[in-house]
């Protein structure tokens, strides 16, 4: 089965194909970073308009790259939530229309499920059950995964997501967008022990997160250190990055102990963070990350998640529907 995967939930227009035998092919991404950079964050209306312009050429490019024709596609999978309403509508409309014209099924995919399943694309994937730490621009969640579609939320952020904390802190430090890679770059020459920043909610029981206080602590430190030297900027970035990573590691360890699983999956944009990847060696379990290009938003994870559901005869209605908010626990088990 050949599945076309379409991702337009935020600021990446991304397309890929997943073929049952061959795996991922025709992987293409167009990032809107330049478009949103000067605003310091994603402008939803600009994102939607740009997806409209880029999606069809990208589908053609993906097919060409993988040496397939439109008529070879057996099904279309597109992200139908969570995400920005207008941006999701572009992928949903084009995905469904294409499937209608080709007389093939189409399926709306949950964006966080797609992130969560991305490590299964690896040569040595994790076995079920496992715990997944999902860390993206919009979500920070710990999920107990028994099977595809069988998800129990163990904890989540009560305010800012981890990626959002990176983005907002980068803005405070006068760095570019997206903030995660920028902070990492600057932090690599900094001293992560110079500033004693909080590790929020690690001193109390539970698996929820809260990152907005950490951002405020950074803001106060920046005000205290004016004028900010480049050395001080690097030290603040490194201390902030270490505080987020330490917090995530503490909660992961707790989730592993509570569920007694042997494997942890870390996925979503922040999973690309080098310090986080290194620090997971401290955990008492096997840790699985998607390859770096599959951490941030991409069409491959959507094509794969769609493929796993479509080959299990899961169907969808013909309506062009999106779900800007969508509870992962409500998905059907495959
Ligand atoms: O999964 P993703 O591409 O989009 C959403 O679903 O939100 O995640 C984007 C987030 C952004 O907040 C970005 O700053 C963060 O992932 N990110 C990183 C890194 N690369 C991307 N955060 C920390 N370190 C990185 N290397
Ligand atoms: Zn994402």
Image (tube, rainbow, N blue to C red):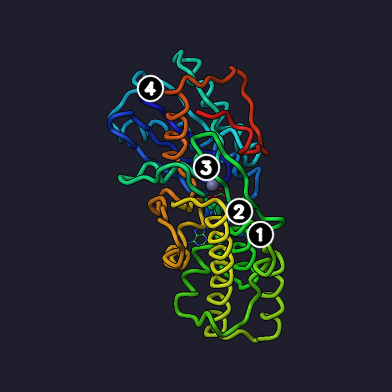
Of mark 3 and mark 1, the one earlier in the sequence is: 3
Mark 3, mark 2: which one is toward the viewer?
3
Residue shown at 64%/33% (left/top)?
330
Residue 239: where, in percent of width, then height?
56, 77
Residue at mark 4:
73
Asked whether the residues under the numbered discs 2 and 1 touch, taking CB atoms below 8 Å apart as contact, a structural biologist would say: yes
Classify 10 Å Cα crowding around label 1: few (below 14), some (14-19), many (20 and above). Answer: many
Mark 3, mark 1: which one is toward the viewer?
3
Residue 262: where, in percent of width, then height?
44, 52
Q: For residue 145, which numbered disc appears in the image?
A: 3
Residue at mark 1:
209
Residue at mark 2:
140
33 shown above or below 63 = below
Real-space CA distance between mark 3 and mark 2, rounded to the nearest whole angstrom? 15 Å
In terms of secondary structure, where does tag 2 sit? strand
Mark 4, mark 3: which one is toward the viewer?
3
Mark 2, mark 4: which one is toward the viewer?
2
- 49 sits to left or right of 298: right
- 57 sits to left or right of 161: left
Q: For residue 34, which numbered disc appears in the image?
A: none
In terms of secondary structure, where does tag 1 sit? loop
Of mark 3 and mark 2, the one earlier in the sequence is: 2
């Amino acid at each position: 089965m050949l599945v076309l995967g379409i991702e337009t939930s935020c600021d990446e227009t991304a397309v890929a194909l997943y073929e049952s035998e061959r795996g991922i092919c025709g992987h293409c991404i167009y990032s809107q970073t330049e478009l949103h950079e000067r605003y310091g964050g994603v402008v939803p209306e600009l994102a939607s308009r740009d997806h409209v312009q880029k999606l069809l050429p990208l589908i053609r490019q993906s097919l060409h790259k993988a040496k397939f024709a439109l008529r070879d596609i057996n099904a279309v999978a597109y992200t139908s939530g969570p995400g920005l309403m207008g941006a999701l509508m572009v992928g949903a409309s084009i995905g469904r229309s294409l499937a209608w014209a080709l007389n093939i099924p189409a399926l709306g995919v949950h964006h966080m499920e797609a992130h969560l399943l991305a490590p299964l694309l690896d040569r040595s994937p994790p076995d079920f059950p496992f715990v997944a730490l999902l860390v993206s621009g919009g979500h920070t969640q710990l999920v107990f995964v028994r099977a595809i579609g069988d998800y129990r939320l163990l904890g989540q952020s009560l305010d800012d997501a981890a990626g959002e904390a990176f983005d907002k802190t980068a803005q405070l430090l006068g760095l570019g967008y997206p903030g995660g890679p920028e902070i990492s770059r600057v932090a690599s020459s900094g001293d992560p022990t110079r500033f004693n920043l909080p590790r929020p909610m690690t001193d109390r029981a539970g698996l929820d997160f809260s990152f907005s206080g950490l951002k405020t602590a950074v803001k106060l430190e920046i005000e205290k250190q004016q004028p900010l030297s480049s050395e001080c900027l690097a030290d603040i970035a490194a201390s902030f990055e270490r505080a987020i990573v330490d917090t995530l590691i503490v909660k992961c360890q707790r989730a592993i102990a509570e569920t007694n699983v042997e494997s942890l999956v870390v996925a979503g944009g922040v999973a690309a963070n080098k310090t986080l990847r290194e620090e997971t060696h401290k955990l008492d379990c096997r840790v699985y990350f998607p390859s770096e290009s599959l951490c941030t938003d991409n069409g491959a994870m959507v094509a794969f998640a769609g493929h796993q559901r479509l080959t299990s005869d899961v169907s969808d209605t013909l309506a062009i529907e999106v779900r800007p908010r969508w509870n992962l626990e409500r998905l059907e088990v495959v």
